[in-house]
């Protein structure tokens, strides 16, 4: 009886314990799943909000990008306009001197010379620590490439004076371009790299102080297109001293009597002009005028 009772009473206990275990197991599983789902849900939410803010940022970046492109286009157009204006400005500008308020005088030396005289010129300029602007013909640069290379290496600048000293207002347009281009080629060949100059000086003045004519106008446009200014001078010797013996002393005197702030002095690579060069440089400084290159004169701030 006892045995029977015992066995009957054990069975339900076992079952309820098993149910409890299953129940607890299920509860635990549900809880774990719930927690897991909740954390998944929260992770998704976080990702979603991150995604949203990234999308917003992307939209902003796209908008900024569009704005930058617009700005780029505007700047590009402005640049084209300024270049055009610059070209017009250059093509209508003939410079005879710089700002009179500046106590500087540009030293420019034209044509070409033997390597010997060239090195003597560069020695004088070096000794006085002066940078000058030299206007050689391309044919002279071809003849003495090392000397012109030395000139550029020592900080002097070169200006286009045509290849063969041609008077550009009297030859056809294609010849004009050829004269200017061959100068560039000769200089590039001598230096070993392409050299851009801001300055053009018409050989023999070539009618540049005479009244306008259509050929000169066209020539000025070509010079402007090539990015150059036409440079004349306000102190020179060939015309001024044509009826006098131009000794180095007389040359020096004439330059010192006539140069003032902003002047552009025209010398040539002749024995007499180069012999006068040291006294000219010293004399200018004694008068409070600093000899310099065209770039230094024309790009200087007033008061410097
Ligand atoms: Zn010349």
Image: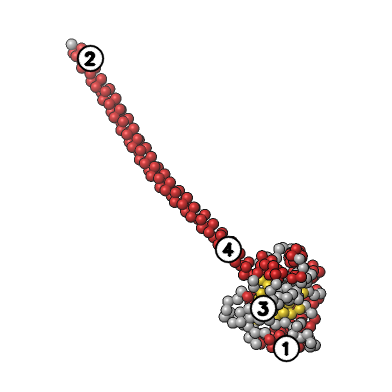
- Label 4 sits on a secondary structure element that is helix
- Look at mark 1 in the image and give the residue it sits on: 253
Which label belongs to residue 7?
2
- The image quadrant of residue 130 is bottom right
Q: CA distance from mark 3 to mark 1?
A: 21 Å
**Residue at 54% from the left image edge and 60% from the top image edge:** 75
Crowding near the residue tagged with mark 4, few <14, some 14–19, many ≥20 C-alpha atoms within 10 Å: few
> In the orientation shown, which residue stands out farthest toward the top?
1
Q: CA distance from mark 2 to mark 1?
A: 143 Å
- Look at mark 4 in the image and give the residue it sits on: 81
- The image quadrant of residue 241 is bottom right
- Look at mark 3 in the image and give the residue it sits on: 96
Point out the tag, 4 or 2, that comes first from the N-terminus.
2
Q: CA distance from mark 4 to mark 2?
A: 108 Å
Q: CA distance from mark 1 to mark 4?
A: 46 Å
Kindly report which numbered mark, 3 or 1, lies closer to the viewer in this rendering: 3
């Amino acid at each position: 009886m006892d045995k029977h009772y015992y066995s009957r009473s054990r069975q339900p206990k076992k079952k309820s314990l098993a149910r409890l275990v299953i129940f607890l197991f299920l509860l635990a599983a549900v809880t774990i799943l719930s927690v897991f789902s909740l954390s998944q849900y929260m992770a998704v939410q976080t990702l979603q909000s991150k995604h949203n803010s990234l999308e917003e940022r992307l939209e902003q970046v796209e908008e900024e990008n569009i704005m930058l492109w617009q700005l780029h286009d505007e700047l590009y157009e402005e640049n084209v306009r300024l270049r055009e204006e610059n070209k017009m400005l250059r093509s209508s500008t003939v410079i005879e001197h710089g700002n009179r308020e500046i106590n500087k005088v540009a030293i420019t030396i034209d044509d070409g010379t033997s390597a010997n005289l060239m090195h003597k010129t560069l020695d004088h300029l070096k000794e006085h620590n002066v940078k000058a602007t030299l206007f050689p013909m391309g044919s002279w640069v071809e003849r003495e490439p090392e000397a012109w290379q030395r000139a550029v290496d020592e900080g002097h600048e070169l200006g286009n004076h045509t290849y063969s000293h041609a008077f550009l207002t009297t030859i056809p347009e294609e010849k004009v371009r050829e004269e200017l281009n061959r100068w560039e080629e000769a200089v590039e060949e001598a230096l070993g790299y392409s050299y851009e100059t801001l300055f053009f000086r018409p050989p023999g003045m070539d009618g540049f102080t005479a009244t306008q004519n259509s050929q000169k106008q066209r020539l000025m446009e070509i010079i402007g297109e090539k990015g150059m200014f036409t440079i004349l001078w306000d102190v020179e010797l060939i015309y001024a001293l044509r009826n006098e013996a131009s000794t180095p002393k007389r040359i020096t005197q004439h330059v010192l009597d006539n140069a003032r702030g902003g002047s552009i002095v025209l010398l040539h690579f002749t024995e007499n002009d180069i012999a006068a060069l040291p006294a000219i440089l010293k004399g200018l400084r004694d008068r409070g005028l600093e000899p310099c290159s065209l770039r230094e004169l024309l790009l200087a701030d007033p008061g410097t």
